[in-house]
Amino acid sequence: MLGMAVLSRCLFNFCSFHTMVNAVFTTPEPGTVLQPIYEYSDEQQAHIKTLREYADTLLLDPLDPYYKWELRWLNKPDTMPRYMRAAKWKLPDAKRRIEGTIKWRREFRPELIRPDEVKIEAETGKILLNGFDKDGRPIIYMRPGRENTETSPRQLRHLVWWLTCKDFMPPGQESLVIIVDYKSTTLRTNPSISVASKVLTILQQHYVETLGRAIVTNLPMLLNFFYKGISPFLDPVTRDKMRFNPDLLDLIPKSQLDSDFGGDFDFEFDHETYWKQIVDFCGIAEDGTRLEGYFDGPKNIHGELPSQHSDEDTEPGTASRTSTSSTTASVTSAGETKALASPEATPAAPELNEVS
């Protein structure tokens, strides 16, 4: 009887201090300082302006149904700068790159991927967007060991659907973190080199300068050949951003890091609950478009996050690493666990931006 009492007390204590959470983080940890932040010289700003003028000559006819989505993408403040940085400020290369992406987007139409089209791919949580790193970047967890479908174009569209959910990026943040966890991954569940090369092509050519960090954890010796196989498809910039088995607490606040990786965030994945939160937060309609008031994303959920930069120490067109801001971010802490589905946690929808 004494043993049962002790066991019951232990279970009570465990439950008291080990509460699972199924609410999704929508903001970085309070006090987060966004970086990298880019500043541009007059010459670089002129290049950005010229690139935009060139992109405007490629626009679809305003009567085309996809026109407003194409213009929406071009109007994002980070689009032109990202392509100029990716081209190392060589205007002809930037023009070639952005023209290639425009053609790809017209065929793939990433903004119009219907949630129900890819929902089955998300049933096991093999790709999860949840939490932010210490620089305010959203985190995408990829767990190949949870693969639940056969290889198909839908798998690729599922990944692109997540890359399109940039609504989680605080204003001023242009990149995200991808953590690939190979725990429980087998040769059967690991993506083929062919699929991986297609993913890398999309990420490197059509989401340029979007990958802030790529972290690989729990990679078994058996799968070392996989990274040797995809190595020829990695451009030097992507390769430089890859880290294998780093201490994630050096990069991500403990409160925002999944407990599977040593963090305090005990996230309990429930497919229906999780999916609804993501779709609701981004304001995604059944046909993949955005609900009224969400055309430019629910950015008002984010507080004013300070940028870490100094006019004196920042090279033009480079990322700043010198902190001169003492402002504290006013954001909703996910530790306070406000469910997105609840009315008090849902951001007020701004007026729909008209596109002419």
Image: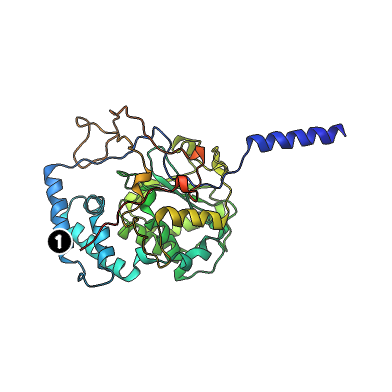
In this rendered view, identify the residue nearer to me: 303 or 165: 303
The residue to which callout 1 is attached is 54
Is 60 positioned to the left or the right of 272 in the image? left
Is 131 positioned to the left or the right of 12 in the image? left
Q: Is residue 247 visible?
A: no
Image spot of residue 320 (x, y percent): 27, 36
Q: Is residue 320 above or below residue 26?
A: above
Q: Residue at x 20, y 36 (%)?
A: 315
User: Can you tell which quarter of the image residue 329 is in?
Assistant: top left
Image spot of residue 282 (x, y percent): 40, 55
Q: Residue at x 35, y 35 (%)?
A: 33
User: Can you tell which quarter of the image residue 55 is in?
Assistant: bottom left
Q: Specify the quadrant that holds the N terminus.
A: top right
Kind of residue indicated by mark 1: Tyr
Q: Residue at x 52, y 54 (%)?
A: 274
Q: Is residue 300 above or below residue 91?
A: above
Q: Residue furthest right?
A: 1
Question: Dot 1, crowdedness within 10 Å: few (<14), some or many (≥20)?
Answer: some
Q: Is residue 260 above or below residue 250?
A: below
Is 53 positioned to the left or the right of 2 in the image? left
Colour style of the rendered protein structure: rainbow
Is 317 positioned to the left or the right of 34 in the image? left
Q: How many marks?
A: 1
Q: Residue at x 51, y 41 (%)?
A: 337
In this rendered view, identify the residue nearer to me: 57 or 36: 57
Q: Is residue 52 visible?
A: yes
Q: Secondary structure at mark 1?
A: helix
Image spot of residue 102 (x, y percent): 26, 65
Q: Specify the quadrant that holds the C terminus.
A: bottom left
